[in-house]
Amino acid sequence: MTYSSTPELIATCWTSAGNIAPLSIPETSPVLLAERLAAIAATGWAGFGLAYDDLVAARDSIGFSGLKGLIDQAGFRYVEVELLSDWWDESRSHEWRPQFELLLDAAETLGARFIKIGTAFGEPLNDLDFLVEPLRRLTKGASQRGTRIALEPMPFSMVGSMPAAAELMRSVDMPDCGLVVDYWHVFRAGTSLEELSRSLTADQIFGVELNDADAEIRGTLFEDTRDNRRLCGEGDQDVTGFIKTLQAIGFNGPWGVEILSEQHRTRPVSEALESARSTALQCFPA
């Protein structure tokens, strides 16, 4: 297997969002969309991600067709859209279904590779069978609109680990339903690289997110992931080993970089993007 000399990197939504954090109300970036995309392009990224509230703002201003024009003009190859939750709960479908429809519209017009979804915060569950049919329904809806569904396990959510998520994907058994593998969540869930290698197959990996973390957790797991992530290579994770593990499984990019921290948010967006990209590239094996 051969790998390109310069990996293609995607600035996931929070990496370029500026001074705004997950669970803010709303989560809309304070950076004007055109300025944000220009900064992402100028710092050498192959693609970018946008969160739901940013997509609402884009739809209501320039429209998704206008956004697609900016994407084409900048030459981006990859677009990601996120995040849907509560999709398993039909009693809340009046809330999540309109969100899903907007994400589908965005994915279809922008050519997004997948729609990222999550599960409710709390203790990870052992029995995930109740998610199989809802995932199949979501995936069918995405497939009909030319995109896919990618679930991101998080150690403070119902689907807490990659091995559990990979088993869930085997139960769903649909080629358009897969996983986003975020190294912070792998590391904090206590999953070793060996366990990751044993549990995942290449066809399950729709997206990867690179980042780093200190050995010690500060605050809750959510507070730590929101406020204390480190640039790649500047924490205590084995980012290079993680990349090698995924390459050995058969994944070869594009690679997302998701940096979330109080420090990152307060930096000028172009400077934050440049630091996130350059440190990530340094972690790739020669």
Image (cartoon, grey):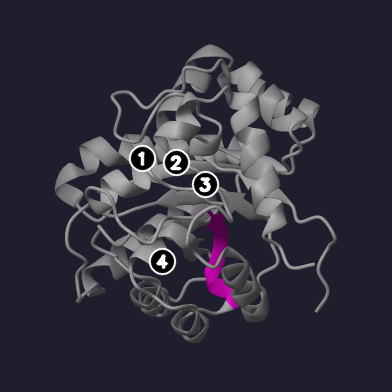
Quarter of the figure with residue 63 = top right
Front residue of this view, candidates 80 and 216: 216
Assess whether mark 1 and mark 2 are in contact (beta carbons under 8 angstroms): yes
- Whole-angstrom CA distance, mark 1 to mark 3, is 12 Å
Instruction: From the image, tell me which residue sits under label 3.
Output: 258
Front residue of this view, candidates 188 and 150: 188
Instruction: From the image, tell me which residue sits under label 4.
Output: 187
Q: Earlier in the sequence, mark 2 or mark 1?
A: 1
Disc marking residue 260: 2
Q: Earlier in the sequence, mark 4 or mark 1?
A: 4
Q: Earlier in the sequence, mark 4 or mark 2?
A: 4
What kind of residue is marked 4? Answer: Phe
Assess whether mark 2 and mark 3 are in contact (beta carbons under 8 angstroms): yes
Question: In the rendered image of this protein, does residue 82 appear above or below residue 269?
Answer: below
Q: Is residue 178 magenta?
A: no
Few, some or many residues within 10 Å of mark 4 (<14, 14–19, 20+): many
- Whole-angstrom CA distance, mark 3 to mark 2, is 6 Å
The magenta segment: 202-211
Q: Secondary structure at mark 3?
A: loop
Q: Secondary structure at mark 4?
A: helix
Instruction: From the image, tell me which residue sits under label 1.
Output: 227
What kind of residue is marked 2? Answer: Leu
**Residue 68 percent location from the top left of the image:** 67, 28
- Whole-angstrom CA distance, mark 2 to mark 1, is 6 Å
Front residue of this view, candidates 272 and 168: 272
Q: Secondary structure at mark 1?
A: helix
**Residue 126 percent location from the top left of the image:** 20, 76
Disc marking residue 60: none
Q: Secondary structure at mark 2?
A: loop
What kind of residue is marked 1? Answer: Asp
Q: Residue 228: tell me if it is visible.
A: yes
